[in-house]
Image (cartoon, helix red, strand yellow):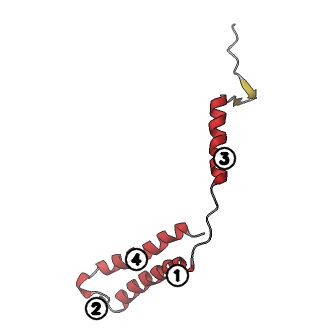
Amino acid sequence: MPESKSRKTGQIGQKSKSPARAERGQRRADLRAEKPEPGPLPTWYKAIMFGLMIVGLLWIVVYYLTMGVAPIPQVGGWNIGIGFGVACVGFLMTTRWR
């Protein structure tokens, strides 16, 4: 029975990299190392982020407590959507929080 072709590997189970591919990987690693680490967020960003979450929650609470009379009676049930929308903007801001 003929033998199968053996793989060219540096170690068992790992394929050897071509020189061009290894060089590209090294360049990517160098570029990542050059990027400065982002600093902490300013205080105003955190205040707006938490403020929007609280305003959205309060909007919904006021709508339920006043039985639809406030905050904007003309939009009716959309007040819940407005409250959730405002709160969601605050929650989306948390993705940039460091």
Secondary element at image label 2: loop
- Label located before the other in sequence (1 or 2): 1
Position of residue 40 relative to residue 79, above or below, is: above
Q: Which residue is mark 1?
A: 47
Secondary element at image label 1: helix
- Label located before the other in sequence (2 or 3): 3
Residue 9, image quadrant: top right
- Label located before the other in sequence (3 or 4): 3
Query: Residue at 62% across / 37% down in the picture?
Result: 24
In this view of the protein, which residue sits in the foreground, 40 or 95? 40
Q: Which residue is mark 3?
A: 30
- Sort mark 4 into few (<14), some (14-19) or many (20+) by Cα contacts within 10 Å: some
Estimate the x, y position of residue 3 in percent, counting from the top left. 70, 11
Q: Which residue is mark 4?
A: 86
Disc 2 to disc 4, how far (Cα)? 19 Å
Q: Which mark is residue 8?
A: none
Estimate the x, y position of residue 10 in percent, counting from the top left. 75, 28
* 61 to the left or right of 75: right
- Label located before the other in sequence (1 or 4): 1
Disc 1 to disc 2, how far (Cα)? 29 Å
Query: Residue at 25% across / 81% down in the picture?
Result: 75
In this view of the protein, which residue sits in the foreground, 35 or 85? 35
* 87 to the left or right of 66: right
Q: Which residue is mark 2?
A: 69
Disc 3 to disc 4, how far (Cα)? 41 Å
Position of residue 81 relative to residue 5, above or below, is: below
- Label located before the other in sequence (1 or 3): 3
Secondary element at image label 3: helix
Secondary element at image label 4: helix
Amino acid bearing label 1: Ala
